[in-house]
Image (cartoon, grey):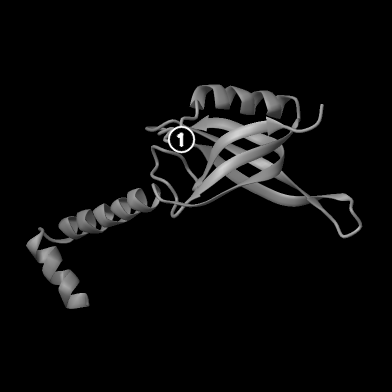
């Protein structure tokens, strides 16, 4: 295996060529897997972080403090989940309107249900930072 990589590196111009090939394969696999849905669902909680982030590619990210129930029926903290809003909007979602809603519900400390799709791999950097892509947000309660 090592001799094969050396041969490829030599053919492609030393270690620089090898780095280019490996990088291309990694980004290619991420791009392919990031476009394949492996599931969907919904989670309930309160947003504790909503931000637009990125140096080159601006993405809209959020963290949901999840709500759970204990065996006695009391509400309990069930951890958190990071979500991205898909900058490709392949499912017809309006990213800007969705981001405004996320900010509003965070400011109001409002309990919400987040509908999402899960991709096969983490999506490419220009789409978002996670493989959990928000499709919609619905407030719960009054």
Q: Position of residue 119 (x, y in %)?
A: 46, 50
Task: Judge left or right: residue 44 versus residue 133.
Answer: right
The residue most toward the left is 11
Q: Position of residue 118 (x, y in %)?
A: 51, 49
The C terminus is located in which quarter?
A: top right
Secondary structure beneath dot 1 equals loop
Q: Label 1: which residue?
A: 91
Q: Residue at x 78, y 51 (%)?
A: 68
Q: How many marks?
A: 1
Of 117 and 28, the residue lying toward us = 117
Of 19 and 97, the residue lying toward us = 97
Q: Is 49 located above or below residue 108 in the figure?
A: below
Image quarter for residue 21?
bottom left
Q: Position of residue 24 (x, y in %)?
A: 25, 52
- Binning the other alpha carbons within 10 Å of mark 1 as few (below 14), some (14 to 19) or many (20 upward) gives few
Task: Judge left or right: residue 5 versus residue 118.
Answer: left
Q: Residue at x 19, y 70 (%)?
A: 5
Q: Is 17 located above or below residue 41 in the figure?
A: below
Q: Position of residue 32 (x, y in %)?
A: 33, 51
Q: Residue at x 76, y 33 (%)?
A: 140
């Amino acid at each position: 295996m090592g001799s094969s990589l050396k041969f490829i590196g030599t053919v492609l111009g030393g270690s620089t060529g090898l780095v280019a090939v490996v990088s291309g394969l990694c980004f290619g696999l991420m791009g392919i897997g990031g476009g394949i849905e492996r599931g969907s669902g919904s989670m309930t909680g309160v947003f504790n972080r909503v931000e637009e982030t990125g140096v080159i590619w601006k993405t809209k990210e959020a963290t949901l403090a999840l709500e759970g129930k204990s065996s006695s029926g009391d509400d309990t903290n069930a951890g958190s989940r990071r979500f991205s809003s898909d900058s490709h909007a392949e499912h017809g979602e309006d990213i800007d309107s969705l981001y405004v809603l996320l900010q509003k519900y965070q400011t109001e400390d409002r309990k919400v249900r987040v509908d999402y799709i899960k991709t096969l791999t983490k999506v490419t950097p220009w789409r978002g930072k996670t493989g959990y892509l928000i499709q919609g947000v619905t407030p719960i309660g009054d």
